[in-house]
Image (spheres, rainbow, N blue to C red):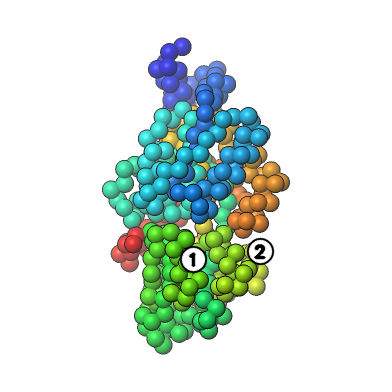
Amino acid sequence: MTFLHRRSLIVGAAAALGAPAVVRAQSVAEWPKGPIKIIVPFPPGGSTDPVARIIQAKLIELTGWNVLIENKPGGTGAVGSAVAAKSAPDGQTWMITFDSHILNPAFAPALPYKDSELFNVMEIGQTPQAIVAHPDRPYKTFAEVVADAKKRPGKVSMGVLGASQGLVLATLIKKENDVDINLIPYKGGGPLNQDILAGVTDVAMGSTTSLSPHIVGKRVRAIAVTGEKRTPALPDTSTLIEQGVKGFPSYSWWGVYAPTGTPRPIVDKMHAEITKAVRSPDVTQKFVEVFNMEILTTSPEAFATYQKAEQERWFKVIKDNDIKGD
């Protein structure tokens, strides 16, 4: 079988619902053809790279596959996402990314790829964001931050990641609570954490994953979480909802994508193997303890529905408030 003919069969298996079962089965039986590449559209560090590498190691252990990680940073994940989107839909290329991925079309309309070129495989898991204060500041809750900012408009500073849900949520909070907080966008979690630790900003919003070590070390004080309920990682920290602060529940999450056109039987096989990997006791323990992650391993359909709903509500906030990514 020539490469062209084999490739045609693989793509056709995904596109034609009426394709014979024998063709679909054959494409799965022949897969994978060589190394499996997982693109991480961020540099080493942060949370997405270690999440991907933990999954990579367990996939190798469970399946014996040759699984490689390729970091393709740039453009808040847009560079790596474009590489994944333009890759052959043959099941050899996948992408593990972070929640900011779905906001890229709103912040940068001229992206080198389209959402439609990436297929939702699964949401791995999620964690609420945390809001913390420098220990020298008087705030015990975020409601106290809002009250102070109303007395001193524009004087209270808050660090957030640029082109992120944190930036959008903070902007929404300002509008819905009629308060002027000075938002300072950062290009990465490292610089954001450095400035809140140094007291350059009064408060900061980031994932519980990146902020928990500093909370535990008492280098910052947790004053709110952004989920619908409290997180086991910070059981004594109340939610924005509990504090009466208006806004949307917001979560950091990690997800898997594939180039659109990847045969569904191959997608289902990869989904099953990643689910086994993520739900292996040792991996689950790492994700819970290190990343404060609620494991989800959702179906492609549920993930696509979630992404659509999230984009609809966050895009509206971005448009209504003319929010820029930096």
- Quadrant where the C terminus sits is bottom left
Query: Measured from the top left, where is residue 185 in percent x and y?
Result: 38, 65
Query: Residue at image x 60%, y 73%?
Result: 218
Q: Name the mark nearer the viewer: 2 or 1.
A: 1
- Pointer 2 local density, CA inside 10 Å: few below 14, some 14–19, many at least 20: few
The three-letter code of the residue at mark 2 reads Pro
The three-letter code of the residue at mark 1 reads Asn
Q: Is residue 310 visible?
A: yes
Residue placed under numbered mark 2 in the picture? 232
Q: Is residue 176 visible?
A: no
Query: Measured from the top left, where is residue 100 in percent x and y?
Result: 43, 54
Residue placed under numbered mark 1 in the picture? 193
Query: Residue at image x 40%, y 17%?
Result: 4
SS class, disc 1: helix
Tell me: 241 left or right of 308. right
Tell me: 86 left or right of 9. left
Q: Residue furthest top?
A: 1
Query: Measured from the top left, where is residue 145 in percent x and y?
Result: 48, 80
State whether residue 128 is above or below residue 142.
Answer: above
Query: Measured from the top left, where is residue 292 in percent x and y?
Result: 62, 58
